[in-house]
Amino acid sequence: MSSKATPSMLGRALLALIHRSPSSGYDLRKLFAESHLHHFSSSPGAIYPALQRLENDALIQGTVEQIDTLRPRRVYRITPRGLAALRAWLECRVTREDVVSNIKDLTLRFACMGGHLDDAATLRFLDGIVTELAPFVAELEEFARTGTGDLPVHGRLAVKSGLAQYRSFLEWAREARNHFQEGETGG
């Protein structure tokens, strides 16, 4: 077993997908290439090493199926240890560092919550985003008002761009929270 305790973002996405449906590396590559997960590499040089790391860490287990065919398939299933790691990641408290530097990870966590966590846990997650992000947005707004005077135009415009992105994510988190509070989860 390897010493790496926490899977990469790609590893966590793979864990969530394998938990939903046992899959081969080829199936996963195809899914990444044809879906909203396209920002992850669908290359064998990314997917197969990530699967191997997850298997080395006993988070998934691969079994060879269709042995008597020309193309046997190695199908991966999540292990109890993998399920515990997946749940721990999904239930992890949102921190300021998450909202400042890891919005992509937060978005992936939210996308993976369906079918894994109940609405109360999803609400805690969304509340965490709002609680941590609202003061950060306020700080950025204050900086944009008072602290960008010495910046060149490129710097000022970059601050405006970042502020717009954080505001948008905060608006989304509040809207998503309202959906869950009103029971509009769609399933």
Image: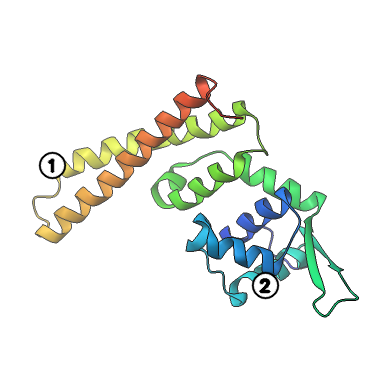
Residue at 56% in and 38% down: 93
Residue at 20% in and 38% down: 142
Q: In the rendered image, is residue 58 in sight?
A: no
Q: Quadrant of residue 31?
A: bottom right
Q: In the shown orientation, is residue 139 left or right of residue 132?
A: left
Residue kind at label 2, given as amino acid type = Tyr
Q: In the shown orientation, is residue 185 left or right of residue 118?
A: left
Q: Quadrant of the C terminus?
A: top right
Q: Nearer the viewer, residue 9 or 115?
A: 115
Residue 96 % position (x, y):
43, 42
Look at the numbered disc 1 and give the secondary structure of its residue: helix
Q: In the rendered image, is residue 38 in sight?
A: yes
In terms of sequence position, does the residue under pointer 2 or pointer 1 come before the other?
A: 2
* Distance Cα–Cα, label 2 vs label 1: 49 Å
Residue kind at label 1, given as amino acid type = Thr
Residue 124 % position (x, y):
55, 29
Residue at 74% in and 46% down: 84
Q: Nearer the viewer, residue 154 or 113?
A: 113
Residue named by callout 1: 146
Look at the numbered disc 2 and give the secondary structure of its residue: helix
Labelled disc at residue 48: 2
